[in-house]
Image: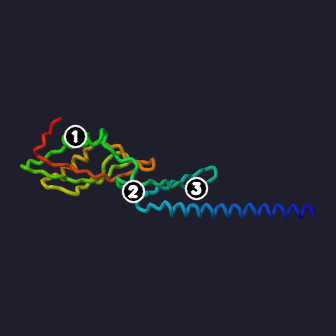
Amino acid sequence: MKKISMLILILICFTQCHSSTETKTSKDKKTEQNISKENDFDDSVSETTTTNNNNNNNNNNKVQIKEDTKIYDIDSIDVKPDFEGGIAKLQKFIRFNYKYPEEEGLTGKVDVNFVVEKNGSLSDIKVTRDIGFGTGDEAIRVLKKCPKWFPATHNNKLVRVRYYLTIPIDVYYEQTP
């Protein structure tokens, strides 16, 4: 009788452990599915998959690294990108590097936007308003020459941000240091 009750007890323990493992596995899968649904960044996330082969137990471990490549709007982030020395230094940099056209009486504004990358570099420079005479191309040239910025942060992570800038054009403006 003791042997039978002991055998039944062992079977119950085995069954319980086995079902517990299956439940945990299914819960993990459901959790992964929920996390992937919540964090579905579509185009804004690049994935890298790495496979490690361990010779001792021949397990394949897959590691997925998700990097946020979304371009944030300047108003939706915690800390905005900044030129080293502030906006006054940026204006000074543009003033000394911009080659103004030699057209008489030319005035106006060139509107540009660009992405300040996570490393502080500028990319995707676009002219949205140009007054002609090569002013837009010159704005792009100067911004490509621009030193690195302090990148933006959102939720304590570096992020890419679209930045908008207006460059005033006045050929009579003195270029003094």
Q: Of the two numbered discs 3 and 2 on the same chain, state the one appearing first in sequence.
A: 3
Q: Amino acid at mark 2?
A: Lys
Q: Residue furthest top?
A: 177
Q: Are marks 3 and 2 in contact (CB under 8 Å)?
A: no
Sort mark 1 into few (<14), some (14-19) or many (20+) by Cα contacts within 10 Å. Answer: some
- The quarter of the picture where the N terminus appears is bottom right
The amino acid type found where label 1 is placed reads: Lys
Question: Comparing marks 1 and 2, which lies closer to the viewer?
Answer: 1
Q: Nearer the viewer, mark 3 or mark 2?
A: 2
Residue in the image at 58% along x and 55% along y: 60
Tag 3 residue: 60
**In this rendering, which labeled residue sits more in front, label 1 or label 3?**
1
Q: Is residue 152 left or right of residue 138?
A: right
Please name the residue that numbered disc 1 is placed on.
Answer: 92
Q: Earlier in the sequence, mark 1 or mark 3?
A: 3
What residue is drawn where x is 75% and y is 62%?
Answer: 16
Query: At x 36% / y 48%, what residue is drawn?
Result: 80
Residue appearing at x 45%, y 47% in the figure? 156
Helix, strand or loop for disc 1: helix
Q: Which residue carries the number 2 mark?
A: 70
Compared across the picture, whether 19 is left or right of 146 comes to right
**Viewer-nearest residue: 33 or 52:** 33
Disc 1 to disc 3, how far (Cα)? 56 Å
Q: Is residue 153 above or below residue 29?
A: above
